[in-house]
Image: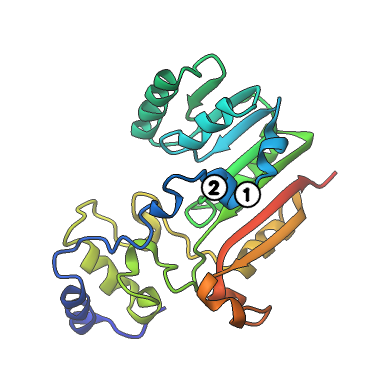
Amino acid sequence: MGIIGGRLGYHILRSVCKDGRYTGYMDGSAYEHRSKLETLLGPSVWDAIRDKTVVDFGCGVGAEAVEMAKRGARRVIGIDIVDYYIRRAVELARREGVTDRCTFVKHTHERADVIVALDSFEHFEDPAAILRVMRNLLRDEGSVLVAFGPTWYHPLGGHIFSPFPWAHLLFTEKALIRWRSEFIHDGATRFSEIGEGLNQMTIRRFERIIEESPFQFAEFETRPIRRLRRLANRFTREATTSIVRCKLVPCL
């Protein structure tokens, strides 16, 4: 992937983003004063979780798990593999007074009625394995609510590797990693090795993974980028989709 590499690619990236600061394209400001859960999953999410046991898979610092606990879920279990996130989530639940119904752990065996996965399927190192884990955590009559993006061919599908639109497709992985190493010193040598991971997920790849998983689509939607809405269709969706949103149910 990418056609500009070597010293040329590296120096172009350095000149575009000289001090290594992130562009701010995806800094979370889109959800300021709004519920991320409701924005991504729609207002029906509150009915879906009401009086249910919910697993927030990839909960991060716990904001959405706490919100679900405050807005009707009977019990919320936030799961994340990062210790720092777990600590922050526990503290947030304590401050918001929901520790009686909101727990944060690195793994659980408790089965859920609903699993929520926001902005995570483009980061999982092995999405197929994650789906198998989810199936073991989900009751037979349960569902998985998923929303993620941007996908790989989105203008900003490279996340931090997109200092400008489609930079992650224009430059080689090696050039982008070298540029990133100027300001993040974690030893990553591939997209998949960065802290949050980046698996280059496309819409079609996600569909294939679901086809081979223990789940099937009950609902599936690709929400277009607002400014490219008129160009969005089944042929252009990889480049014009902002968010993939779906509901998965077990194959019984």
Secondary structure of the residue carrying tag 2 is strand
Question: Residue sitting at 38 percent across and 76 percent down?
Answer: 165
The amino acid type of the residue labelled 2 equals Leu
Q: What is the x, y in percent for residue 160?
A: 33, 62
Secondary structure of the residue carrying tag 1 is helix
**Residue at image mark 1:** 41
Q: Is residue 162 visible?
A: yes
Q: What is the x, y in percent for residue 59?
A: 49, 37
Q: In the visual, does 110 lie left or right of 81?
A: right
> If the image is split into quadrants, where does the N terminus sit?
bottom left
| Image quadrant in which you'd find residue 47 | top right
Q: Residue furthest front?
A: 33
| Neighbours of disc 1 within 10 Å: few (<14), some (14-19), many (20+) | many
Question: Residue sitting at 41 percent across and 35 percent down?
Answer: 61
Tell me, yes or no, whether the two marked residues, 2 and 1, touch with CB atoms within 8 Å: yes
- Mark 1 or mark 2, which is nearer the start of the sequence? 1
Q: In the visual, does 32 lie left or right of 179?
A: right
| Neighbours of disc 2 within 10 Å: few (<14), some (14-19), many (20+) | many
Question: Residue sitting at 26 percent across and 61 percent down?
Answer: 22
Residue nearest the observer in this picture, 135 or 225: 225
> If the image is split into quadrants, where does the C terminus sit?
top right
Q: What is the x, y in percent for residue 42?
A: 64, 49
Question: Residue sitting at 14 percent across and 64 percent down?
Answer: 19
Residue 161, above or below 40: below
**Residue at image mark 2:** 118
Q: What is the x, y in percent for residue 163?
A: 30, 70
Residue 167, above or below 159: below
**Of labels 2 and 1, the one closer to you:** 1
